[in-house]
Amino acid sequence: MKVNYQVNVKQFVIVIILLLIFDLYNSSPCKISHKPVLLSNNTIECQLLTDIDILKTLHWLSSPTNTTHYQCNKLTTIQGLSVCEDFINFESCQIYSVISSTWCDHYGSLAFERYWAEKGCNVTLFHFTVYFKGNVCNNDEELKRIKNLKLIRDSMWGSRCYNCFYRHIKLPLSTNIDILKIQDREGVHEDYDGVQYVIMSDIYLHIPLFIDQVNQIVFRASINSLTLVDNVGREAEQGYNMWATTALLMQLSCIYTKKEEGRHQPLQFDYLLNQAEVDPTFGSYIHTFIQLPKYKLLALENRAIYDSYEPKIPLNPMVGIVPGHCTVPNLEEDNTMQNWIKQESRARCHPNRLWVPCDRNRDYMPFLPCVQDLFNYLAEDYASTKGWCDFNHLAASIEPLKKVDENATKSFQLIDKPDVGVRLAFFFTIYRDFTFFERMFGHLYSRNHYYLIHIDPSGSTLEFENDIRSLANRYFNVYVAEDVRIVYGASTASILLTRAMAWFLEYATGWDYFVPLTGSDYPLLPLRRIEKIFAFQNPPMPFVMAWTPGTSTHIFRLGITHPFFTEDADIVKSIDAVTDERGKVLGAVPMEYRSSNFGPPVTCNNKQTFYHFDNRANKSGSPMDTQWLFPRDKLPGRGRAYAEEDYSGYFQNDEFKHRYN
């Protein structure tokens, strides 16, 4: 083993300064989202992270440097993780493995832990899981039979701490840890990818001296669509967590890296990753870091390399573009709008815990997918609020569904009223459970009505699609559409409904009521009764159905009044299908109140997700309420989200009174 440790005087001085900086970092860590900065008077000041810090961090995590130039003589790879055996004494080696899982038994194969335990190492497995009813640990007896393995189990979110591994470490340790392995489970679904950054950032924050007693760290640096999240909550502050992980690992030297594409390629984050020169076709980087006291100074050159890297910032920053039916008055107004877009895009909002306030205290860049799409959404919100949009313009028209069976238009042209006095246009949005849908459809079918079945093009299997098309082919008035990709948590359900309404208005005639249903709905009344109810209103009048807690009360009372609601197996199964998915108290689960989020869907680069903006939120009880199916702006304008720099005193000014009186 030969290591070139010769350095010139200039390099040596730089390394000594870096060593002092690291000592100061370890003794005075700053609070979350802040970094320590060495001032000219040799004091430390805590400053907020910057865009450059985030880009440098992403670049370094994807390609950390081996400043010691050490080449391992014996590299052993188990479960995809590589360990250098050069410095391991198998008579006394100590290994810590930290894993997190939702289900207690989903810790994976433990091939890594078993191998090193069989080699004679003392392996301590720190297993963090979620404590809830039904989460039973059935395999603990098997773990106890693994020689040299000790199990320590704790709770995720125990004592309001996401993953409290650091609380189990009492410094100084009696002996050094030869290998620290973080996360990476084999053979089970990885439901906590990203927890590795929280664990290491907590070490950096709370027990920074622990790293001095760790000889080797192996972990997967995931930079993918699951981990590129930076919103609200300790588990989701990944911008800072990644930065703190980098600050911690810079005290070691990376001797091995392997990159993998993985299942969650960050293709939608290409605008961000290209600036950090990170290839978005890869989703993870498996690293091996070693700590050699003899070469500590050389390892600290990581800081110099990190600081010298210059991200590829585009000369022309991304800007929001208003849609065709809106016009920006002048350049000054456009600059004001772009500044507002930048400000709003940096508000951190929890994606589904809608009661959690958004965080506007972190001014460094968040991890935004499909940046151009999101900026355009914000530009439209701003322009509509400012009155720059003409909603009578042709470009403002709602686009009808496009991918509809071509014969549907010809068949949906009936003019004469059916004998039942009303014609219904049924629109189904489904993606699974053909057996349930076939039973529901059988109770609702009649030659008198129109039936259009929309299949989620991204969430359905080919077998399910074939079954639906086979069913539709049996009838002259049943057709299939496969157009809008459904993004759970986003506004795609509303987008799909409005486009379906537009399609029926433009391409079908002779119908009286548009009846949208999902694959989880089921009629509590026979079709003939439904027809009579609708036909009673002449001319047709709007009916609106929405799940509310009152619906659950009505179902309960029906079960008491009419025994077949609790005795008929089909009815019971139908009600259970709805309540299992939407909760026993209908209208009180995220699936129902997600309309208050109305996060815009983003589908660039053939991927799909959504993003929660602060200007599209539930503000019930205030003039800025954007609740229910469509966000709406200032009273009584509807159909649009809002955007304003300062609302203080707005509703008393002359402009508001003129517009809305």
Image: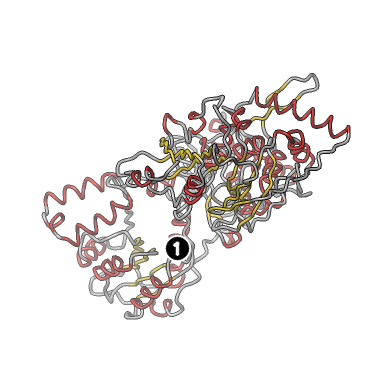
Q: Left or right: 538 with respect to 556?
A: right
Between residue 35 and residue 624, name the one nearer to us.
35
x then y, percent, for residue 394: 58, 62
Q: Left or right: 503 with respect to 26?
A: left
Above or below: residue 372 compared with residue 350: below
x then y, percent, for residue 50: 69, 36
* Picture quadrant of residue 262: bottom right
* Picture quadrant of residue 533: bottom left
How many numbered marks appear?
A: 1
Q: Left or right: 149 with respect to 657?
A: left
x then y, percent, for residue 11: 85, 34
Residue on which the image places disc 1: 459
x then y, percent, for residue 236: 53, 40
- Farthest right residue? 9
Mark 1, other Cα within 10 Å: few <14 / some 14–19 / many ≥20: few
Between residue 523 and residue 291, name the one nearer to us.
291
- At x 63%, y 51%, the residue is 75
Between residue 242 and residue 520, name the one nearer to us.
242
Structure colour scheme: secondary structure
* Picture quadrant of residue 156: top left
Between residue 93 and residue 206, name the one nearer to us.
93
